[in-house]
Amino acid sequence: MFSSSRLPLGAPGVYAVADVAAPRLHPQHMDVCAFVGVAPRGPAYQPVVDRWHPGGHAMMSDEARPYRRSTPVLVHSFDQYRSLFGAFEGPGYLPYTVAMFFEQGGRRAYIVRVVHEYAPPALGDPAPYRDAWAAGAVEGITVGPLGFLARNEGSWGNGLRVEMGYSTYALGFACEDGATVTVDRAGAAPVGTLLRLASAGGDTMLCYVRAVRERRDDFLPGSRWALELEPAPVFAPVRVDSVEAWLGVRDGAGQSERFERMGLTPGHPRAMASLLCDESSLIWPDPAWAGTELWPLQPAVELLHGLSAPFEEGEDRYAELLHEDFFDSGWSAAETDDGAYAAGIAALAACPDVTHVVVPDLYVPAQWAGDDVATEVVRDTAGADFAPCVDVAVPPSAHNLPPSELRQLILDPRHSVDLMAIAALQQQVLDHCEQTAAMVALLDVPPGLSQGQAERWRAQFDSSWGAAYHPWLVASRKLLGGDGTGPGQLRPLPPAAVAAGIIARKEIERGIHFGPANEVARAIVNLAEPQPRDRAGVFHPLGMNCFVRAPDGVELVSARTLSRDRQWRQLSVRRIMLMLRRTLLRETQWAVFEPNGPTLWRDLSHAIENLLLRLFRAGAWAGATPGESYFVSIGREQARLDRGELLVEIGVAPAEPLEFIVLRLRRDGDGTLTLES
């Protein structure tokens, strides 16, 4: 048996109370990456639900309801991503980058779908963002057609079909005072239930339960509940059935939903419009009926069955996307709503566990502006003699390629004006990360740059909140939707997404203090562009992290930030400091209302030092002893104490990853060879 945790008491007297263990701090995980890009489907323009705006049918029937253009969604696998945002059918890089993140070993990712920003509609006017939502209707099942809308914009909604019918359940009842229907349970027929009453002569009528009133039994313990019906019964019923609706929806791509036992009036606990608004990921109820009462076409509801035609008018408005749609000019880090109404990358303010961000569709390189960019050509190189290796991927070319649908996002990094425009857009991403101090931006070095152009691009940045990766990569055709047989298309991938997966993998396997480099990129078969000899050696001092071809595959060989400050040049240093910031902000909230005295000082100091000691033992600090690695100091100035302030100063010396091991081979005069390291 387990011993009691209570203080054992004996004879009356004074007993010492055991000390309460000081709180323990737990390092926050730093492997969650966010991807902001273009997808063929997925949440966009979602009605806001909060304490001022309740959920249910009001999400569509309330014309003044605000909306969220961008909604971050957490996914744990690419299969989950594909069910919500589609696969590789769109023109954006987003699905490719998410697939590579999970392939490299990532486990959690937030997805933000970017759509064009439209002006808010005037009260009573149709919302312009709904113009691209597919629509359909079920006829012959209610009085008037019943319309539905696709959950979000895109041609994907044109594959939707809705099927609807009714089911009935006999209700135990008693008939009192001629036509008053009573039941023995309060929840047998809640308000809003549709009932079908049948007379002894075979007549039927439909009526709604408007109220339920308790009636105490004068002779027996207990109660019965009288149902107030509308319209009022014109006969004494001999049978009462509860009428409920069911609805099924399919998107034509393998996704389906089914809802049972739904009510037809907004006041019902399982109102159809409310269930669709709250639980469906495929359709919305049409605003025209979302807040209204529905009536079946006839009392013989078992004979009613409706199937909509495929939805129509869903459009992919890729051509309207602008670079500005990735940002929210009206949001700032000082906002108090934590990103509840923010759009684009700013919507990530509502996701406190995001640690890195990748924006793969921020621009489309002009040289790869088509959907099919690199045709794989398999050559038979077997022969009797050795010969130089032959690449199996032809370098991408812009010739004879269909133009990208993301027309307004195309920029040519080989032209100086466009290159500076790309750098300005990437700087906006860095600015957001610096303002929020919550995540690190993983950027792609634009493709097709000469050495001089790459150096001019690099000169635009000086921030430890960003890291840059080069060059773009080519992934396995089989991984990205191909069947692995015959010729196919290979698409150059932004390298930052692959790096994000490697960062997550390295932390999960070894810990945050290990530099996320010297790792082979899984499922990467080639570099998208031929690289000059020793390009990585030239880029490394500039803080541009390179993928190179190695005997084991394509390997990431460095992990530096874009900072010119030597103290912040290592990505592992920025990440471990961000982890400390997150841990202290989140796990010391218990100290806010504690008395500012020695007990609080002791508990805080013990908790922080314990965390730093565990990191020291893991090798995260540079010192040989704890005293050389970190310190924790609590300010006890009387003036500060009089103001009720508590200041804790924490100093740490992060260990930089070892980048170079220098070996010296020396031959002495007697011919002895000595190797020194």
Image (cartoon, rainbow, N blue to C red):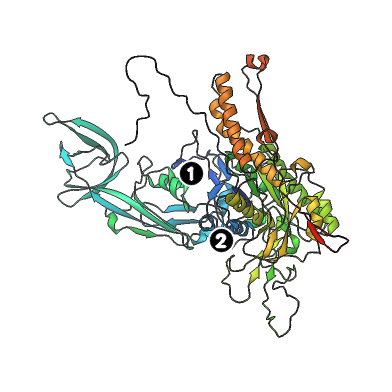
| Viewer-nearest residue: 273 or 442 | 442
Location of residue 446 in the rendering, given as x and y in whole percent from the top left corner: 76, 56
- Against 493, is 61 above or below? above
Front residue of 63 and 109: 109
Instruction: Report helix, strand or loop for mark 2.
Output: loop
The kind of residue tagged 1 is Met
Which of the 4 image quadrants contains residue 176? top left
What is the distance, in whole Å, between disc 2 and disc 1 at their CAs? Answer: 28 Å
Disc on res. 60: 1
Quarter of the image that includes the C terminus: bottom right
Q: Residue furthest left?
A: 219
The residue at the far bottom in this view is 384
Label 2, on which residue?
Answer: 87
Decide which of 291, 612 is in the foreground and name it: 612
Q: Can residue 622 be seen by looking at this rendering?
A: yes
**Residue 114 in sight here:** no
Residue 677 placement, left or right of 523:
right
Instruction: Tell me, yes or no, whether the two marked residues, 2 and 1, touch with CB atoms within 8 Å.
Output: no
Picture residue at 32% right of the left edge, 57% below the top: 304
- The amino acid type of the residue labelled 2 equals Ala
